[in-house]
Image (cartoon, grey):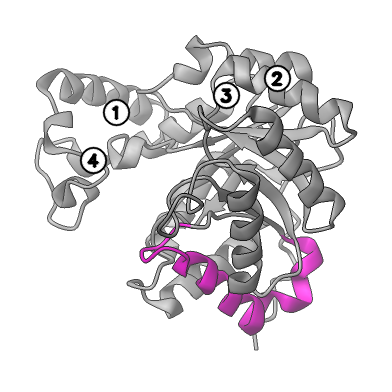
């Protein structure tokens, strides 16, 4: 039986999410990779235990995380049964719907049919009666926004989610969503978007500013740019076990001479400040005004421990 570390809340690593009552750890654990059917359950369990034992109470999932689709949520269900059931009220568990999940016209996007069916399936896989946070995973240009958003309102009012989030919606649609939800007494808790030293789109397009001005939380994903902002590629080589070697989410042609030069410059700056490139990259995201938390993945306890340094090193900063 798993017993959580009694000192798990001794570190000051939490930030308030907008103007809500929710506090999130500066680092949140993402289940996109390393928690699927192809991964070792025991390793996934060790990573999740280590995270919770060090105050990481937010687990970020989606219906199609795996591989295979749904299997990361099934892993979460096993973790609930094996380890986390006594600690359910300490955890903040998120899932999403909107990307492809099953065949046919209702297997993805933002219809009421898809969102409600997907969440029902997610709850069954995770062995939960509700999630703490439910996201629209992407903007649907063909479904009326009112349909998507009203389905989300009804999900909260049915007690199947405590809070709502938006992921990867364009600014104008995001503004409409915030107004629609506020008018129905289900305020938007958080926006999730890609943010790292190589991709500042949410800064450039005004989304992060909007979150700040409207007191909406912001959580960043891909802070290490799929591993580019680590020491794995600094010498121009492509490790055989890397994401770039698989060429699914990160292509070989991303590693240009110009990028390598920039990575070396950033690595030099990081080293001069006693940090690794990955720690500096995480630190950079956390430095951005309006950022509540950043989602990190981990393929081992050791990797998670290294990534956590950025959050703990900043415990006396804003």
Q: Earlier in the sequence, mark 2 or mark 1?
A: 2
- Residue 51 sits in quarter: bottom right
**How many angstroms separate mark 4 from mark 1 (CA)?**
20 Å
Q: Earlier in the sequence, mark 4 or mark 3?
A: 4
Q: Is residue 124 at all visible to an observer of this figure? A: yes
Nearer to us in this view, 10 or 17: 17
**How many angstroms separate mark 3 from mark 1 (CA)?**
17 Å
- Residue 189 sits in quarter: top right
Q: Looking at the picture, does residue 46 appear above or below residue 239? A: below
Q: Residue at x 57, y 24 (%)?
A: 287
Q: Which residue is mark 3?
A: 287
Q: Earlier in the sequence, mark 2 or mark 4?
A: 2
Q: Nearer the viewer, mark 3 or mark 1?
A: 3
Q: CB atoms at circles 2 and 1 under 8 Å apart?
A: no
Q: Which residues are magenta?
A: 64-91
Q: Which residue is mark 4?
A: 250
Q: CB atoms at circles 4 and 3 under 8 Å apart?
A: no
Q: CB atoms at circles 2 and 4 under 8 Å apart?
A: no
List x then y, in percent, for residue 62. 53, 54
Q: Which residue is mark 2?
A: 176
Q: Which residue is mark 1?
A: 267
Q: Earlier in the sequence, mark 4 or mark 1?
A: 4
Say the numbered circle drawn on residue 91.
none
**How many angstroms separate mark 4 from mark 3 (CA)?**
26 Å
Nearer to us in this view, 138 or 246: 138
């Amino acid at each position: 039986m798993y017993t959580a570390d009694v000192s798990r809340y001794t570190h000051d690593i939490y930030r308030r999410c907008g103007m809500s009552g929710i506090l999130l750890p500066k680092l949140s654990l993402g289940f996109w990779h390393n928690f699927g059917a192809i991964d070792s359950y025991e390793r996934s369990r060790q990573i999740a235990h280590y995270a919770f034992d060090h105050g990481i109470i937010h687990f970020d999932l989606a219906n199609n995380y795996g591989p295979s689709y749904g299997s990361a949520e099934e892993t979460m269900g096993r973790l609930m049964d094996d380890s986390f059931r006594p600690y359910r009220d300490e955890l903040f568990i998120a899932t999403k719907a909107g990307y492809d999940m099953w065949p046919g016209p209702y297997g993805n996007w933002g219809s009421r049919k898809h969102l409600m069916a997907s969440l029902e399936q997610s709850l069954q896989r995770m062995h939960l009666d509700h999630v703490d946070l439910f996201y629209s995973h992407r903007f649907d240009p063909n479904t009326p926004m009112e349909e998507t958003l009203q389905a989300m309102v009804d999900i909260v009012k049915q007690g199947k989610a405590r809070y709502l989030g938006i992921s990867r919606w364009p600014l104008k649609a995001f503004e409409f969503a915030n107004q629609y939800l506020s008018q129905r007494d289900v305020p938007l808790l958080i926006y999730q978007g890609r943010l790292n030293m190589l991709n500042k789109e949410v800064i450039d397009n005004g989304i992060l500013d909007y979150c700040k001005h409207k007191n909406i939380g912001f959580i960043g994903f891909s802070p290490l740019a799929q591993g580019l902002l680590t020491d794995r590629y600094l010498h121009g080589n492509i490790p055989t076990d890397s994401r770039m070697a698989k060429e699914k989410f990160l292509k070989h042609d991303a590693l240009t001479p110009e990028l390598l030069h920039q990575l070396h410059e950033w690595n030099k700056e990081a080293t001069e400040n006693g940090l690794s490139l990955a720690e500096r990259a995480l630190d950079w995201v956390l430095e951005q005004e309006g950022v509540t938390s950043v989602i990190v993945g981990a393929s081992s306890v050791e990797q998670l421990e290294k990534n956590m340094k950025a959050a703990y090193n900043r415990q006396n900063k804003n």
